Amino acid sequence: MPQSICTYGFIPVRTEPSESSQMETQILFGESFEILERRDKWALVKLNYDGYTGWIDEKLIDLLDDRDVDLWEKSDGFIVKRPFVKVVREADSTVQFLSAGSKVVFNGEDRNVIKIGQKEFYWQGIVANEKVDVEEVARGFLNAPYLWGGKTFYGIDCSGMVQVVYKTAGVLMPRNASQQIEKGQVVSYVEEAKSGDLAFFDNENGDIIHVGICLGQGRLLHASGSVRIDVLDHQGIYNKELRKYTHHLRVIKRVL
């Protein structure tokens, strides 16, 4: 199968080959994917990172040799850990912002140049590959609006945030909360939850519908309306502004 690498801040991945179709997830800068099928101006792709499939606009696909993609995947790159960092595209000097979770590989010994196919980008500002813990990465998304299928500071959903935050720690998590709950060990009591643990929430049918990142001391960072911090106890998430519980706690898991 032909492959490519995302050279944009993100590419929307949709359920059907239509601009009006629901966005299911996003491909972040530096993430590679296989092209499974082409239909009109759309391409059905499979993300190499988590195996997710969906449709993207084929105008956003860079034509690359499989060798280029394989070399990119095998290179010693790093994962962006801040909400966004700035790069400048060499061809037209346009600015592009990379979200946390994006993959960057520098071109040889030049620690400022990113080269993907015929495109070159110049890294600017923040120190590359700095050490940032999971809680600090998660807090970087505070106030980001909730967006179904989103994985960036411009819009993110609950499981997308968990996947991105854990990716910066070198841990591969599935895309959806119903899959993420299968990872890690059970934490018996809320009081034992540590920073970086995951809390999962279900509906009246027992289906997992939400996930958040524990901060310890009865606090939870999660995407609900926006990325925010709320109270977590044995019953679930308590929103002080609404003065009510908004989510029912199913289990807390420790993955890290």
Image (cartoon, rainbow, N blue to C red):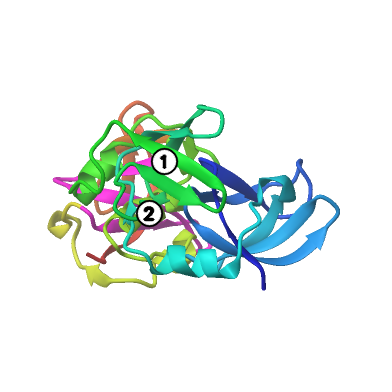
Q: Residue furthest front?
A: 109
Give the residues in magenta.
Answer: 196-223
Choose between 74 and 27: the one closer to the eye: 74
Which type of secondary structure does the marked residue at label 2 adopt?
loop
* Residue 215 on the magenta segment: yes
Overall secondary structure of the magenta stretch?
strand
Q: Nearer the viewer, mark 2 or mark 1?
A: 2
Q: Residue furthest right?
A: 40
Which type of secondary structure does the marked residue at label 1 adopt?
strand
Vertical arrangement, residue 211 with respect to residue 36, above or below: above
On residue 99, the disc is 1
Task: Tell me which label, 2 or 1, sits earlier in the chain.
Answer: 1
Residue 129, position as x, y percentages in the image: 24, 49
Quarter in which the N terminus is drawn: bottom right
For image coordinates 55% across by 53% down, the residue present is 117
Side (left or right) of 72 relative to 169: right
For image coordinates 16% across by 55% down, the residue present is 194
Q: Quadrant of residue 83?
A: top left
Residue 92, position as x, y percentages in the image: 56, 28
Instruction: Measure the C-alpha gap from mark 2 to mark 1.
Output: 15 Å
The residue indicated by pointer 2 is 105
Choose between 36 and 71: the one closer to the eye: 71
For image coordinates 53% across by 60% down, the residue present is 32
Q: Quadrant of residue 122?
A: top left
The amino acid type found where label 1 is placed reads Ser
On residue 4, the disc is none
Residue 227, position as x, y percentages in the image: 38, 36
Quarter in which the C terminus is drawn: bottom left
* Residue 29 on the magenta segment: no
The amino acid type found where label 2 is placed reads Val
Regarding residue 224, the answer to whether it shows in the image is: no
